[in-house]
Image (cartoon, helix red, strand yellow):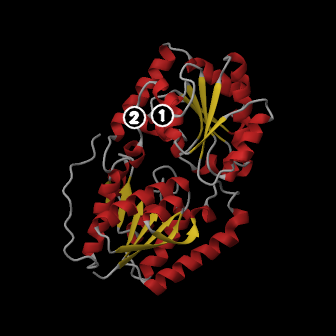
Amino acid sequence: MASVDLLVVAGEASGDVLAGELLAALRARRPELRAFGMGGPRLRQAGLETLFDASEISVMGFTEVLPRLPRIWRVFRALLKAAAARRPAVAVLVDVPDFNLRLARRLRRLGIPVVFYVSPTVWAWRRGRVKQIARDVDRMLCILPFEEAFYRASGVRAVYVGSPVAERLPAPAEAAVFRRALGLDALRPTLAVLPGSRAGELRRCLPALVESAALLAKEHPGLQIVVPLAPGVDGAAVAAGFRAQGLTPVLVEGRAAEVAGASDVALVTSGTAALEAGLMLRPLVVVYRVSALSALLARLLVRVAYVSLINLLAGRRLIPELLQEALTPANVVAEVRRVWDEGPERTAMVEGLREVRTLLGSGQASERAADEVLDVLQAHGALPGVARVVRGAPSQ
């Protein structure tokens, strides 16, 4: 059977995971599909011909991106050139909207249909991009329940495929279960520190998290500090930061959700990891810090009340968010103290997290996303005879 090319572009660790799961689901059903583009280890494992690594464009913040622009622009042009030469049957663009929406515009001009996986947060800021999305994107695959109706009202063909984050997490269990699975002492108090995956996040957030952990270690004798390392993060550098405060953390390759599940409380840099930690039904404190200029621009442009997806989904301040100047060890420790021990505040937070997990539903997000990609391929005549699997709506 003749092969069919896909262009797949993911630009950071979380996007690489989602795209890798999607590509694996696609190739399990249609082995003739081949993929080339940009991704990380999970996409390579799924069979991606990697022209560029996902880390090439992994940068956060308005001003932080400026020094990287020449390299990002070279990657953009090279991907576009490869698409023009190889004419993929469809392009699957995953997250990183500033990069991928520009790519979608150029791919439309080449006549290449675009499936966009993980909606840009146009409901939060830059709503004018919805018009471009309606023009350039053939199918928007949403992972937040409220996004489908938002897009459809603006003429975008959008589908809520479910939450791949909730789908791949282990079932919540007692902390001792995860501690034993990670080789930790099941009886010792445990703090999870999830510092992020980008260099800027580690530089700006990790020192405050380390100082917070040092203060908490004095309050909780025998404290185990566990740090999951995202792909590409230098574990030796992370460990050195803790050693400077007299701490010896347990470093774990990946397994962020299990690390959160093993904890009494988790300190988490805002992003997908915060959602994962919350869905493990553990109290957490979300932190984030960008440059002063990026923060100013965000205050002027962003139109949502919260940074974390957990609070956005809950519709209230369910978990604390310590951002910019509010990210101090004293503030972190104060928030942790509120929920460390069993009591009304800890119980209320955990019950709220349970409600968010129920809202997202579970099951087969990658398979549903694969259904939509195959549907687009069939609509454009690239895979005649594709049988669409009939699935129920994601449980919510």
Q: Residue furthest right?
A: 244
Residue 66 visible to the viewer: yes
Give the number of callouts. 2
Horizontal placement of 394 versus 240: left or right?
A: left
Residue 153 visible to the viewer: no
* Residue named by callout 2: 356
Residue 39 in the image, given as x and y percentages of width and height: 52, 64
Q: CA distance from mark 2 to mark 1?
A: 9 Å
Instruction: Please identify the quarter of the rendering in which residue 247 is found.
Output: top right
Residue 181 in the image, given as x and y percentages of width and height: 49, 33
* Residue named by callout 1: 278
Instruction: Please identify the quarter of the rendering in which residue 389 is found.
Output: bottom left
Q: Check the image and report above or below for 165 versus 351.
A: below
Horizontal placement of 93 versus 362: left or right?
A: right
Taking depth in this image into account, of 228 and 78 the one nearest to the observer is 228
- Residue at 59% across, 25% down: 190
- Marks 2 & 1, CB-CB < 8 Å contact: yes
Q: Quadrant of the N terminus?
A: bottom left
Choose the circle earlier in sequence order: 2 or 1: 1
Residue 261 in the image, given as x and y percentages of width and height: 49, 31
